[in-house]
Image (spheres, helix red, strand yellow):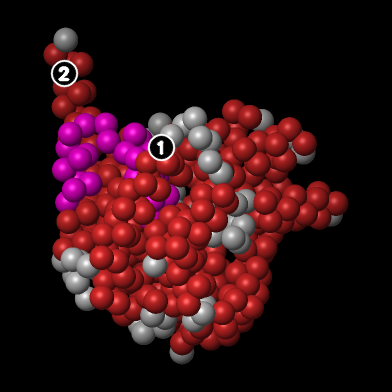
Amino acid sequence: MNLIELFLVFLKIGAVSFGGGYAMIPFFETEMVSHNWVSLADYVKVIAIAQVVPGPFAVDSSSYIGFKVAGILGALIATLALCLPSFIASVIITKFYTQFKNNKYINALLMGVRPAVLGLLISAAYIIGIKPLYQVSNTFLSLMMLKAFIVISIGYYVLNQRKLKIGTFSFIAAAAVVGMILF
Amino acid sequence: MKIFLDMFITFFKIGCLAFGGGYAVIAILQKEVVELKQWVSNDELTDIMAISQTLPGIIFVNSATMIGYRKKGILGAITATVSSILPTFFLILLLTFVIWGFTDNIFVHKAFTGILLGVTALILNSVQKTWKTAVKHYSDIVLALLATALLLFTNVNVVFVLLLLAGLGFGKNLYFMRAEGKEHESH
């Protein structure tokens, strides 16, 4: 029963998660919390660990959540269900690429959904950066929040310095060190 | 048969190297699939990446599916898709299993807090990049703000928010296309 539910939930996420990557975080969070599968505190640990695992971060999420619900079979089912809708869409689109490319309805839809992806990303930033701290201190006005705000701002500033050309790995390692010193 | 094995090994290898998300993987695909294996041309890869980003789901996996399908039909698509996911699938379960015991340690906990704030900065950075492709008109800003407000300040389900915004964006784009078409006619 759990397996069927797991399959359907991840199939749904796979079908609607436009934007990919971090834009998928709000979908995972909503489902795992409402089904009581994984707590946010545990999920953000997995996101931290996923930074040193190669490959798509959505697969990190589906494998972990699936594993918590139903072991290795759960991990397999969640991950396959997540990839199935876009697998089918990719095959169909490759087959009829030229027709798709010039279809104005499809273009209107694919372009139309992009602003929503911005909302998903901002929501993901909140879920990862602020919400876990809020769950600990229960207020937005604390020293911890102020420190978090400063670290995020500096990180954002550093990433925007084209001259620095900082790699994701060294950036994450630096963030870990800053965390150990400041928190 | 040999091509399937070759495909499996190549996408498994790319899966092992793909640190840093969807966009970082483009450079690796270019080297492995275009230059070394010559399964698709550079132009085809550019097309594939553009479509992968607009489809739901994972950009890297979508492009693996398309490359596999172009080269060897549905079996090629399955081979490329599965082998690109496998490294992540096993590594995250293994690593989580190994590290979990340490995550209650105070220093690991502090380091994780720092990492998550770093990831938050990375996400905000991708907001900036996505902005360039998503916002073509001031109405797109209105839609983006509406999505953000619904997700952050209400309990409306995220799937519903996405479907609502997709409908609004679709309708808006059709309206503008029609208006543009009429303008062309009158000139």
x 54%, y 64%: residue = A50
Q: Is residue A90 visible?
A: no
Q: Residues within 10 Å of mark 1 (few under 14, many from 20)?
A: some
State whether residue A128 is above or below residue A2.
above
Residue A35 in percent (x, y) is at 35, 82
Where is mark 1, residue-wise? A160
Look at label 2 and name its amino acid.
Glu
Q: Is residue B141 magenta?
A: yes
Q: Residues within 10 Å of mark 2 (few under 14, many from 20)?
A: few
- Where is residue A128, by image quadrant? bottom left
Q: Which mark is residue B96?
A: none
Q: Which mark is residue B183?
A: 2
Residue A165 in percent (x, y) is at 53, 36
x 56%, y 79%: residue = B102
Q: Is residue A176 visible?
A: yes
Look at label 1 and name its amino acid.
Asn
Residue A143 in percent (x, y) is at 25, 65
Query: Of residues B114 and B136, which is closer to you in this image?
Result: B114
Where does the magenta region start and end? B119-146
Query: Of residues B39 and A168, which is closer to you in this image?
Result: A168
Residue B74 in percent (x, y) is at 65, 54
Q: How far apart are labels 1 and 2 at the CA level? A: 40 Å
Q: Chain of mark 2?
A: B
Name the element at disc 1.
loop
